[in-house]
Every structure is written in C-alpha cells, then in structure tokens.
Amino acid sequence: MEEAGRDPTGCENLQRALSECHQRFGPGATRDAACRHLNRALAECLVSFVCPEESEAVRTLCGSGGTRLKRSQCQQAQLSLSVCISSHQPD
C-alpha cells in the first residue's frame, strides 16, 4: 500500500531536481540548456509510468538503426505510445 502523500510515479526526485534547476537559473536560454536533461528525464519517467508497455516498446525497438522491419516496428510502437499518451490527456 502507498504511503499517504507519496508520489506513485516514482518521479519525485526528478521533479524536485528540475524545480531546483528552475530556481537556480532565470528564464531563458541558459535555463533551457542547464535544465534540459532533467526536463527530458522527468518527461520520460512520467510517460513510462502512464504508458509502461508502449514506452518500453519504443525504447526497445527504436534504440538503434536496423532493418526495414525494425524501423516499421519502431514507427508502430511510436504511434501506439502517442495514442496512449493522448488517451490520458483531458479533452
């Protein structure tokens, strides 16, 4: 059972680090560059929580080049992930 107030996504450390990065740097290109890796990592963490199977399929199939079949499977996995993410967005 989850503890009250705990983030069930497991992304809380990344969220905290990104928030601290935003506090450290003012808005603009410097902040964008300095916080980019944290922003991407948090996004990947949240997507993996919301759409775990689809996210894993994209990681597995799209991680490197390959045959025409693998590229086709990668595109299908990306589409499935996009549909999954869309299904979790408010109307």
Image: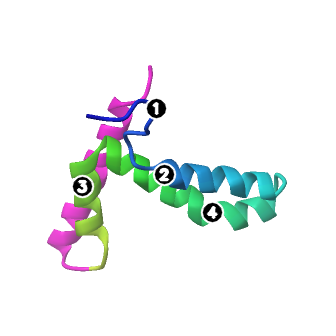
Which of the numbered marks, if any, corresponds to residue 30? Answer: none
Residue 69 falls inside the magenta stretch: yes
Q: Earlier in the sequence, mark 3 or mark 4?
A: 4
Residue displayed at 53% across by 55% down: 14
Q: Earlier in the sequence, mark 2 or mark 4?
A: 4
Residue picked out by circle 1: 5
The amino acid type of the residue labelled 4 equals Arg
The extreme left residue here reads 69
Residue picked out by circle 2: 43
Which of the numbered marks, if any, corresponds to residue 77? Answer: 3
Which of the numbered marks, if any, corresponds to residue 36? Answer: 4
Q: CA distance from mark 3 to mark 2?
A: 18 Å
Say which quadrant the C terminus sits in.
top left
Q: Horizontally, is 49 left or right of 68 in the view? A: right
User: SS of the residue at dot 1?
Assistant: loop
Closer to viewer: mark 3 or mark 4: 4
**Magenta segment, which residues?**
66-91
Q: CA distance from mark 2 to mark 4?
A: 11 Å
User: SS of the residue at dot 3?
Assistant: helix
Residue 73 falls inside the magenta stretch: yes
Q: Position of residue 54 (x, y in %)?
A: 24, 50
Q: Earlier in the sequence, mark 1 or mark 3?
A: 1
Q: CA distance from mark 1 to mark 4?
A: 27 Å
With respect to residue 1, does 26 lie above or below? below
> Mark 2 packing: few (<14 Cα in 10 Å), some, or many (20+)?
some
Q: Earlier in the sequence, mark 3 or mark 2?
A: 2
User: SS of the residue at dot 4?
Assistant: helix
